[in-house]
Image: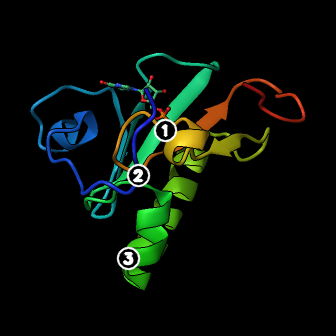
Amino acid sequence: MPIDPKLPYDTANIFARILRGELPCNKVYEDEHALAFHDIRPQAPVHVLVIPKDPFVSWDDFTAKGTDAQIAGFMRAVGTVTRQLELDAPGYRLMVNMGHDGHQEVPHLHVHIFGGRQFFQMIGD
Ligand code: 5GP
């Protein structure tokens, strides 16, 4: 079920629990701004999620309320993860689902990194 991105941050969401160490994840990268881990239901040979450490519900919430330092740190972390995964030469796809129409299911901002194969021109339904 897609989330309502205008609701306040839910500290019980699954990615908040991963950040607090209450639930395990298959970690790829961590720094002061971001945590990256493999998606539990991969949709590509490489499917990694990058989440900010701070509590932002969505891309909309983050870009409206995040500080320049939080946004820059998170964006740089996404780039670092793609290079660590050696996806920079073959290329990769980034995706952020936002709110109901974007079919966002977890109410903590996450960037999907897809790699390991060539993708079609657009992701459909
Ligand atoms: P969304 O549709 O919100 O953009 O994507 C949420 C993603 O989180 C999905 O790809 C889903 O497989 C992944 N996911 C949901 N729960 C967990 C979990 O507990 N651990 C991990 N690693 N991924 C999860």
Is residue 4 found left or right of 42 in the rendered image?
Answer: left
Quarter of image, res 68: bottom left
Q: Are marks 1 and 2 in contact (CB under 8 Å)?
A: yes
In the image, what residue type sits under mark 2? Answer: Pro
Where the N terminus falls, by quadrant? top left
State the image coordinates of residue 46 (x, y, percent, origin top left).
59, 25
For badge 3, the amino acid type reads Lys
Q: Position of residue 48 (x, y in %)?
A: 50, 34
Q: Which residue is mark 2?
A: 5
> Disc 3 or 1, which lies upstream in sequence?
3
Looking at the rendered structure, the kind of residue marked 1 is: Gln
The one nearer the camera, 62 or 29, is 62
Does residue 125 appear left or right of residue 85 in this picture? right
Tag 3 residue: 65
The quarter of the picture where residue 6 lies is: bottom left
Residue placed most toward the observer, 7 or 66: 7
The residue drawn where x is 57% and y is 57% is 79
